[in-house]
Amino acid sequence: MLSRSPAQPQVSPVFVPAQLQERLDELQLRSRASALAVSVVDLETEVAFHYHADRWFHAASTIKVAILLGVFGAIFRGELLPQSRVHVRNRFLSAYDGSPYRVRMDRDANAEVHRSIGRTLRVSELAHAMITTSSNLATNLLLDLVGLDVVQRTIDGFGLEGIDLRRGVEDELAFEHGINNRVTARGLARLLWLIGEERAFSPALSGQILDTLHEQHFKSGIPAGLPRDARVAHKTGDISTVAHDAGLVYLPNRRPYALVILTEWAPSAGDRSATIAAASYLAYAALVGDPEA
Amino acid sequence: MTGPAPSLPLRLADGRRLERRYRDVLLPDGILCDHAGQARLLPRYFYEIESWDQARDTYLSPHFAVAEFIHTDVREAPPLRVFPRYIPCATALLALALELLRDAAGTYVHIGANGGYCSPRHARVGGASPHCWGTAANIYRIGDTYLDTHEAIARYASIVREVLPTAWTRPLAPEHDRTDDHLHIDLGYVVSVPREAAGETYGAKLAGDPL
């Protein structure tokens, strides 16, 4: 089902929302995901498609795109520079009761940030680690530096509904008490659309945000459902009950489209990456046409 | 002059005579209150560090270079994130104390970022922190041991109490104003006035002093 051949010159077919909706219904049934939400916003054709797009999901690591926006907001306001040095310290305060907690090294994909404890890393290095290898320690350091309220105000300032930042990552106590970061597919798609349109603060800063998202290491979701010459600026998110991918898809000879795929699962159920890749392919085929169909 | 001048190749700076942008963040001779509400007089005299090379190459004791005491992050006041930088003269006493700890531990002692001198305008400073006197150090690692467990912190705090009986170590606990991810050592609110410092002329400020 998944096309891996290079994309043909892009000629937009007539987009049929009902057909894509039907195929996503089938995919959800087949995959046994307990929830699936998809948003597509095409900057080329201005087509927008939303499938259960206002359903709230635990954000997992997709919230890091919003935190990245908050960091660049601080850079835009002159409060930070990309080369500003930040003390690497593994001690954060729970959103539930202010008690300290730490990010476990064995649950963090990036050991390099942990090895820098006691020293400093640049804001740009932390942002890179937060996105490309999903470092939880880097995320909390940046959130601690910029401030949760400031990041949420930045999100709100762009009128981005559907992104609810309430705590740092790995805050188990807050998780146990139902304090979680939440997103909707529509909210994340709007955020990506903003970045793709180069309206996140300035074209230059939007470009830097995109550069960071383009360096994503985990490619088993959206990119796996696309032709080889597609480039994706994206962020994945996985915890025991959700698996997401959200990004901007760049194909030859056309403007990008924002694609957000959010899924929810019973613990240890289903082939999550394959389901996200399949949804990515369906969106691609609906927007661009399937050259192998 | 009755003897050789000190060999430290750093200019002695009277904080009260520095440019205003430095005075505003160093607060020479200013007052900070500690958690008990006691007023503490900040240092007036500082060593001036011209460059990172000078910080790295200038040692306050056999094993502790100036650079280790000025490794701050973006939370430090903007004028002190670029050179010239300033450290209170008492920082040299802290370096000597850390030398004793290093000898007792038998290995390297690593001061963490924001763990040496912090100005009163550092965003993490609340009240009279001895870090503003240059007399406190946050130790994150000794040799290959990260001080991020109660056992490791307690072990080295015990060594500190043995070799530096007048030093204070922050109690171990996760609550505010305690520590559980580093060893905090400080010598208290020590102010050092080198012999070559201009000092005070007798005046109104001292007139009430019975001595």
Image (cartoon, coloured by chain):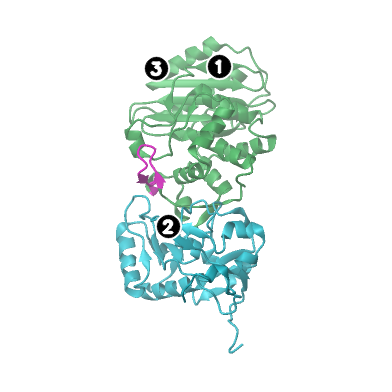
Chain colours: A green, B cyan
- In front: label 3 or label 2: 2
Percent coordinates x, y for residue A173 in the rendering = 33, 38
Chain of the residue that carries numbered disc 1 in the rendered image: A
Within 10 angstroms of label 1, few (less than 14), some, or many (20 or more) residues? Answer: many
**Relative side of A280 to A181, left or right:** right
CA separation in Å, label 3 and label 2: 64 Å
Residue A292 vertical position relative to residue B35 in the rendered view, above or below: above
Residue A137 in view in this figure: yes
Going from the N terminus, do you reach mark 3 or mark 1 first? 3
- Residue ID for mark 1: A49
Numbered disc 2: secondary structure: loop
| Number of the label disc, if any, that sits on residue B167 | none
- Tell me the SS state at disc 1: strand
Residue at 50%, 13% (x, y): give it: A21
Magenta stretch, residue numbers = A92-105
Which-is-in-front pick, marks 3 and 1?
A: 1
Q: Position of residue A56 (x, y in %)?
A: 43, 23
Of the numbered discs in the image, which one, if any, rests on residue B34?
Answer: 2
Position of B184 with respect to B150 (left or right) is right
Q: Main secondary structure of the magenta part?
A: loop
Q: Residues within 10 Å of mark 3 (few under 14, many from 20)?
A: few
Task: Name the residue located 53 percent from the left edge and 35 percent from the top edge.
Answer: A151
Type of the residue with mark 2: Asp
Quadrant where the C terminus of chain A sits is: top right
Read off the residue under disc 3: A29
